Amino acid sequence: MFELTRDTFHDESRQGEAFATIAIADTSKKKFYIESYGCAMNFADSEVVASILIDQGFGVTQNCEQADLILLNTCSIREKAELTVRKRLTEFRGLKKDNPGLLVGVLGCMAERLKSKFIEEEKLVDLVVGPDAYRTLPGLIEEAETGQKGVNVLLSREETYGDISPIRLNSNGVTAFVSIMRGCNNMCSFCVVPFTRGRERSRDAYSIIKECEDLFANGYREVTLLGQNVDSYLYTNPSPQVQKGTNSATTFALLLEMVAKISPLLRVRFSTSHPKDITDDVLFTMAKYENICNYIHLPVQSGSSRMLQMMNRTYTREWYISKVNRIREIIPGCGLSTDMITGFCTETEEDHKETLSLMEYCEYDLAYMYYYSERPGTLAERKYKDDVPEETKKRRLQEVIALHRIQSLVSMQKEVGKTARVLVEGNSKKSDEHWAGRSDINKVVVFRKSNNNLTKGCYADVLITGCTAGTLIGKSLTPKGE
Ligand code: SF4
């Protein structure tokens, strides 16, 4: 796997991150420790889990050695992600030996995929809880405390955790994820998500707006609306904007507009879009509101129509290209990122060349590139032979990465000389004398702190004077003293 810089959806630098806040840690009797892996949905779910446990009187710790309950919120998307969790579990054996009362739980997609088999395979695991069963955690913990194993991997057609206010842990206080839907009805043949996160369901629009309003009131200045397929968001009760007594539904375009209207100072992002579902309505809404960021994560997965058909992506290469053209027509300069898989079943050199040529056409700002790893239980595992040799998959991946490196550097260089509106997220990682934030099109921007009143959560106009492969470097144009 290769990653150039961070993404709003799958942030490689956050894998295995432990959540904590000092204030909560001080007041607790029993403490839980939670580590998260995978996509932003999992990180957002860990905040829901934290809220449920804190409501039950638990405190939180960032040190697993002090914990009474260790939770790993896991990902199944690739074999490597699962191996990381297995390895991590072995590291808890010593802790359990020293503290026999310690409970270890596995949450998320891996729990859902392996179910009680997990407990057979990993003897130290006491709890296995799927993504739709977190409300039952307190009962399962009680059960596990009596020496039984607590398992609940039931998937739900309704659960959205809409009424639970997530506890923002490890937050920069400026940007937050807000889950708007769960599950996925698409059956991409390579993907395990429909089996681990269940059917698609949209969260009540009122609770989403309320959560965003609360975040804004608490100083947050950017929300990322999250879902496996946000464009198919559909809440069928009347929304606050729809008159009582009518049956109109809240579409994703309407939801975006409602969030954007909370305040022009609240930036709105979203992830992930399926190319077949993103509508002109969404694009026009993005174009209409300045605070909806001009950036779309539009996974393509392959540039070959034959591969796309086998992947069950329900669009062709030409259809995808026409969607990219439409985005650029309605939102000129819109940032675009993608996911790409090399070496899917039966992929030929010809298919691979089509992937490279599609990348040349689309000029992605950012790409998440992987070689195909067959996942048990998927349609592809059942229907196709994983027949591309590993060295071929890896060589093709290297070619895709090499092309993307060139393209992403060009995309950074294009910004030099322009002025970017940057939401300041905090100090730059490398120097306390520099601020770091992101531009509207999701580029990381670093600039020297000058003698003005800028703080975290402020917007700054920054003249871009240079760049590296992953960062724009600039100079604040905000006058001194403002
Ligand atoms: S859209 Fe496809 S790749 Fe994305 S979560 Fe759904 S099934 Fe998986």
Image (cartoon, grey):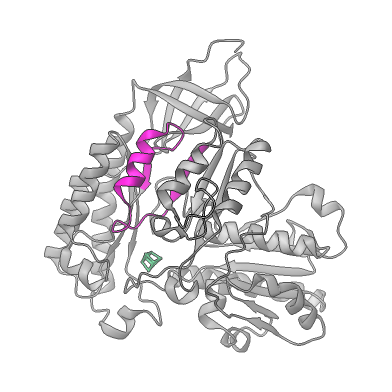
Please tell me in which quarter of the rendered image ligand 1 is found: bottom left
Q: Is residue 257 visible?
A: yes
Quadrant assignment, res 228: bottom left
The residue lying toward the viewer, choosing from 482 and 267, is 267
Q: Position of residue 31 (x, y in %)?
A: 80, 63
The residue lying toward the viewer, choosing from 364 and 392, is 364
Q: Is residue 339 left or right of residue 343?
A: right
Quadrant assignment, res 15: bottom right
**Which stretch did the figure color magenta?**
267-296
Quadrant that contains the N terminus: bottom left
Q: Position of residue 285 (x, y in %)?
A: 38, 40
Q: Is residue 222 above or below residue 351?
A: above
Q: Is residue 5 left or right of residue 239?
A: left
Q: Is residue 439 left or right of residue 316?
A: right
Q: Position of residue 200 (x, y in %)?
A: 46, 68
User: As drawn, which residue projects farthest toward the top?
Assistant: 480
Residue at 49% of width from left, 41% of height from top?
268
User: As drawn, which residue projects farthest toward the front?
Assistant: 245
Q: Is residue 6 visible?
A: no
Residue at 65% of width from left, 83% of height from top?
151
Residue at 79% of width from left, 74% of height from top?
102
Q: Is residue 283 magenta?
A: yes
Q: Is residue 349 above or below residue 196?
A: above
The residue lying toward the viewer, choosing from 325 and 426, is 325
Quadrant that contains the C terminus: top right
Residue at 47% of width from left, 21% of height from top?
461
Q: Position of residue 12 (x, y in %)?
A: 49, 54
Q: Is residue 180 magenta?
A: no
